[in-house]
Image: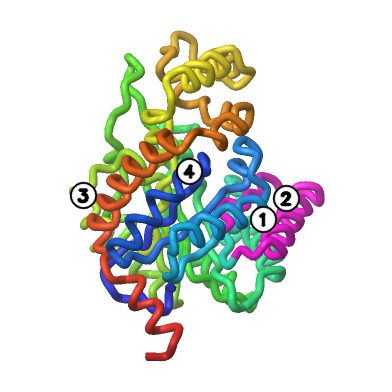
Amino acid sequence: MVNALAGEKCIVMAANIRVTHSARGIMMAAKELDAAVMFEIAKSEIGYTAQPPKAFYDMIVKTAEELEFNQPYVIHGDHITIKENTAEAVGAGEQLIKDEIAAGFTSFAIDASHNFNIEGKTVAEQLADNIEITTKLAALIPETAGLEVEVGEVGKVDPKTGEKALTSVEEAETFIKAIRDAGFSPNLLATNNGTTHGNIYDKEGNIVEQVGIDIDRTKAIADAIAAHGVYVAQHGITGTPLNLMHLLIDAGVFKGNVGTNWQNIALDTMPSDLVKSMEEWTLTSKHAEKMKAKKPGISEKELIGKNIKHSIKEFKEEIDSLPAEDVEKIDEASKKSAIGFFKAFNAQGTAGKVKAFIEGK
């Protein structure tokens, strides 16, 4: 997909599917617009949505078969996160990659970005643990699979200044060169360019638009890594106005992650009594209690918005067994949103280009 669309001035949408029904409307939209698409699940999402790799793979493939969705698509292991350079943490990452390979995943994102030595005297020393972990795990991934790597923890704030800790061009170049020098060829690089994961809230708990992406820094990094055949993966697009997506395209973004958006849509369209039960569970959960301790005075709206994802696992049986008329509502709303994203990403016709590339035409 990367090889087929390199230089096409488009973004390939990668959709994180937390509520299983969400994949349907996205496929419908991708089919209608002939848009390339990726379906992904992060290590954290596997836990709080009760979707182990094989179950996630089977769900995506079954949905595609039911909808006669016959164009090329990717199943991607998003955020295979290793937060510390220990045998236990790295071993857990190794096992997840093996499980995803066995399940049939075709692309993998190694995220060791949390490993940053602020005391390092050079950028190479600061990134040493990230490089070590990333290269060790990359050795497990088949050469034919997609490889995404990450430098600069998404959403991280500098504890000294309180400002966003943006990934520098030097960090991106140093990291990619080290990965390539170790014998690996990543396709995509995720960075901290000012975005955050999930919804953003004001003081009253209302969702606000996300417009913090540093376009100039993103373009500078994209230009620097292009020589290595690596493209930018943009995380945390939920909340970014669609009319600004052309700025991301012009900045060199190739892959755009959209996750919380589909969860929001499902919650807005599922039966109100089910959603109310999920909200009530969320407000009494350990996740909400932990957040209240860290942020006294937080609104119920934000508590629910930030933590309701953890209720998906608890209510999975009820969600997966929704009647057809409720699923159709999710389909319709998800399809409408996906069409908006695909058009904003200039992705119309990209699936056909990928198919032609695969077939050597």
Label 1 CA crowd tier, 10 Å (few <14, some 14–19, many 20+): some
In-image side of 162 versus 217 (left or right): right
Residue range highlighted in magenta: 77-105
Please name which of the two marks, 1 or 3, marks the residue nearer to the observer.
Answer: 3
Task: Choose the circle earlier in sequence order: 2 or 3.
Answer: 2
Q: Which residue is mark 1?
A: 129
Seen at 68% across and 55% down, the residue is 54
Report the disc number at residue 244: 3
> Is the Cβ of the residue at disc 1 closer than 8 Å to that at disc 2?
yes
Label 2, secondary structure: give it.
loop
Marks 3, 4: nearer the viewer: 4
Kind of element beneath mark 4: loop
Q: Which residue is mark 2?
A: 85
Q: Residues within 10 Å of mark 2 (few under 14, many from 20)?
A: some
The numbered disc on residue 175 is none
Q: Is residue 346 magenta?
A: no
Circle 3 — which element?
A: helix
In the rendered image, the vertical position of residue 55 relative to residue 292, given as above or below: below
